Image (tube, rainbow, N blue to C red):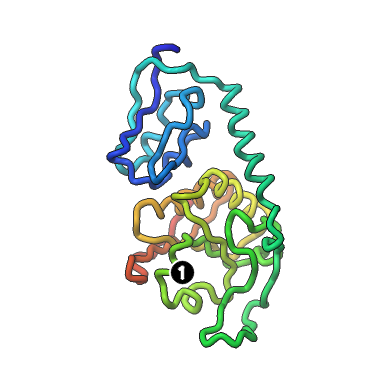
Amino acid sequence: MALRNIVKIDEEKCDGCGQCVNACAEGAIKIVDGKAKLVSEIYCDGLGACIGHCPQDAITVEKREAAEFDEEATNAHLAKEKDTQIKTDFVCPGMMAQKLREKGQTTDSTAEVPSQLSHWPVQLKLVPPSAPYFANADLLLVADCVPFAMGDFHNRFLKDNSIAVGCPKLDDAEFYIEKLTAILKANKLNSLTIIHMEVPCCSGLTQIARQAITKNKIEMSFEDVTIDLQGNVSRTETVEN
């Protein structure tokens, strides 16, 4: 144990938005039961890069007795996290990439309100970065609560577009960043639109898009669409990155 700087998280203030998780390059913070938690003292370098990313001012750096930062253990931790995601990424037969219809093609579904989904799978964790439906696509990155909130989501947004969905609060944001980075690297998109709910934790999806674009070292703007709890579009803005 040593007297050193280390991150302190005020759980009363924390709303679980996950932006600190994205900001921590050492993987020292995770969202557990809706709150940010320090995974291990040895993964925290005490520099506090996460502080400026917390919209609730729930993170500070304090000086106290703590286990020393272990760079070797941290690198092993990050590698294990990434390897775990990769190994579980291709176990489900249902994630085989399938194009359900071409752009502009109508569905042959007998459903009363036909689906506008053009490909499968849709979960960001499962979609292959090199899937043919991403090539020259208008890609929607959507918080997975949005289609439940919006009654007209399919016709208003999904029609003729590719989609990837995920939850920035409950899922691994770092993995999302890496997956979106891989999609952007493998494909030249026509456009990118981020659609999320108005609740604070959902805005993490916008930060995921920002970081993926930055990692690719490309200049790319995207539309950021906010949906209120009644299913209405409350704000739309163009984000330059």
Left-right relation of 146 to 125: left
Residue at figure coordinates x 34%, y 65% from the top left: 228
Is residue 228 visible from the viewing direction of this image? yes
Q: How far across and how far down the image is residue 212, in percent?
A: 55, 48
- The answer to whether 105 is drawn above or below residue 52 in the figure is below
Q: Which residue is mark 1?
A: 147
Taking depth in this image into account, of 236 and 55 the one nearest to the observer is 55
Q: x and y percent of residue 146 in the render?
A: 44, 65
Mark 1 residue element: helix
Q: Residue at x 59, y 33 (%)?
A: 78
User: Residue 150: which quarter of the image?
Assistant: bottom left
Residue 120, image quadrant: bottom right
On the question of residue 136 being in view, the answer is: no
Residue 164: where, in percent of width, then height? 56, 61
Compared to residue 167, the image places residue 151 above or below, namely below
Q: Is residue 24 above or below residue 70?
A: below
Question: Residue at position x 42%, y 76% from top?
Answer: 151
Q: Amino acid at mark 1?
A: Pro
- Number of residues whose C-alpha sits closer than 10 Å to that of mark 1, classed few (under 14), some (14–19) or many (20 or more): some
Residue farthest toward the left in the current orientation of the protein: 12
Q: Quadrant of the N terminus?
A: top left
